[in-house]
Image (cartoon, grey):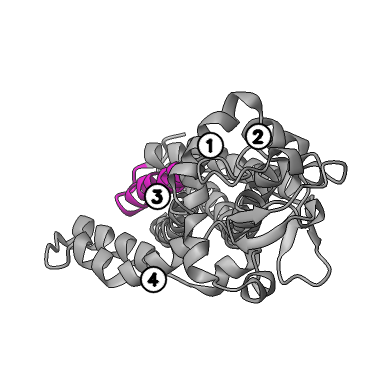
């Protein structure tokens, strides 16, 4: 019985450690500027990671102090959480599989076609009920005016890689540092390191991330599609008569900084392109984590069953049954 409980305690500690990458992936996704404009996508993964953490703690306490009731609760709750994580992974994989990006001949960036993305994702993000708020958020974020500071000449702009891939050039560790500080405070009551210190250390990285993020949206929201035939003046100012017959977005483009192409389908597609790349990156971590969790859960169930069998034999030998 003691050996089985020790094994279960070790497995629960491993499961507790697995909750950390889930929480970190959720915080990373929530910190993305594009997700700041889509509120319902920001925190579900974080909440799921916290639930794994609490359930793992319950199982660890139950195994360490030999509380069979807590172990039973742990096994049931862990099964439910693993199923929820699997459903989330399958959904994320299915809705991010279609890719609406296409190359533009002679340009360093890609453009995005709304019809190329998942219909489920389109309906819930770019529908009329949601896009108004998202559009206002994108306009307030000042992502497009920053292009005027980064690209002076037309050659620099057309050679720029305005794609979601460029967002990954900066790797920030301040989110992981913040998780580390919170864990130290909860475990040791350590107040020597403040979250403000972590923020200051990572502020340079975060500022670069925010400047470079939403590049897919910049390609779709901050400029007209290349096929419109407009002449470059600045990254957010284009002159000449648009070729309306080439693309419906050409008629929507406006040099007004508050308008630009925020109402264009290309802007909606660019935002979906960012979400697709971010979630596919997070899925890699989540797949590895869920495999480890399933392995831990199967062994924990076996250890719990063996402990029950050992207890039954012990009572039988003592004449209780």
Instruction: Kindly identify which residue carries mark 3.
Output: 53
Q: Nearer the viewer, residue 54 or 199?
A: 199
**Nearer to us: label 4 or label 1:** 1
Q: In the rendering, which numbered label is found on residue 205?
A: 4
* Horizontal side, residue 267 vs residue 16: left or right: right
The picture places residue 76, in percent across and down from the top left corner, at: 51, 37
Q: Are marks 2 and 1 in contact (CB under 8 Å)?
A: yes
Mark 3, other Cα within 10 Å: few <14 / some 14–19 / many ≥20: many
Give the Cα separation between the discs numbered 2 and 1. Answer: 8 Å
Mark 2, other Cα within 10 Å: few <14 / some 14–19 / many ≥20: many
Mark 4, other Cα within 10 Å: few <14 / some 14–19 / many ≥20: some
Comes first in the chain, label 4 or label 1: 1
Give the Cα separation between the discs numbered 4 and 1. Answer: 25 Å
Instruction: Kindly identify which residue carries mark 1.
Output: 134
Give the SS element for disc 3: helix
Give the SS element for disc 2: loop
* Bounds of the magenta segment: 45-67
Comes first in the chain, label 4 or label 3: 3
Q: Nearer the viewer, residue 259 or 51?
A: 259
Residue 43 position by quadrant:
top left
Instruction: Kindly identify which residue carries mark 2.
Output: 126
The question of residue 50 being in magenta is answered with: yes
**Which quadrant, please, contains the N terminus?**
bottom left
**Nearer to us: label 3 or label 2:** 2
């Amino acid at each position: 019985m003691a050996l089985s409980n020790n094994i279960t305690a070790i497995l629960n500690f491993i499961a507790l450690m697995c909750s950390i990458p889930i929480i970190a992936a959720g915080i990373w996704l929530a910190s993305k500027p594009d997700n700041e404009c889509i509120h319902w996508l920001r925190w579900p993964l974080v909440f799921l990671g916290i639930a794994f953490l609490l359930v793992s703690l319950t199982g660890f306490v139950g195994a360490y102090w030999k509380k069979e009731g807590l172990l039973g609760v742990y096994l049931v709750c862990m099964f439910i959480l693993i199923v929820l994580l699997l459903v989330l992974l399958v959904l994320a994989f299915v809705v991010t599989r279609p890719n609406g990006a296409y190359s533009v001949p002679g340009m360093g960036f890609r453009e995005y076609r709304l019809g190329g993305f998942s219909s489920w994702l389109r309906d819930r993000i770019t529908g009329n009920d949601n896009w108004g708020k998202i559009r206002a958020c994108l306009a307030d974020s000042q992502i497009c005016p920053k292009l005027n500071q980064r690209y002076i000449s037309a050659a620099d702009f057309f050679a720029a890689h305005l794609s979601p891939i460029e967002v990954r050039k900066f790797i920030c560790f301040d989110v992981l540092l913040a998780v580390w500080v919170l864990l130290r405070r909860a475990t040791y009551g350590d107040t020597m390191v403040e979250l403000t210190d972590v923020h200051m250390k990572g502020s340079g990285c975060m500022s670069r991330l925010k400047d470079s993020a939403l590049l897919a949206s910049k390609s779709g929201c901050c400029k007209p599609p290349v096929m419109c035939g407009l002449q470059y003046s600045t990254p957010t100012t284009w002159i000449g008569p648009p070729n309306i017959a080439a693309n419906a977005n050409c008629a929507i483009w406006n040099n007004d900084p508050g308008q630009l192409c925020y109402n264009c389908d290309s802007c909606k597609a660019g935002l979906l392109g960012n979400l697709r790349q971010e979630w596919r990156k997070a899925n890699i971590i989540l797949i590895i984590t869920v495999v480890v969790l399933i392995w831990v859960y199967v062994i924990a169930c076996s250890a719990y069953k063996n402990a029950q069998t050992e207890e039954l034999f012990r009572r039988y030998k003592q004449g209780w049954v």
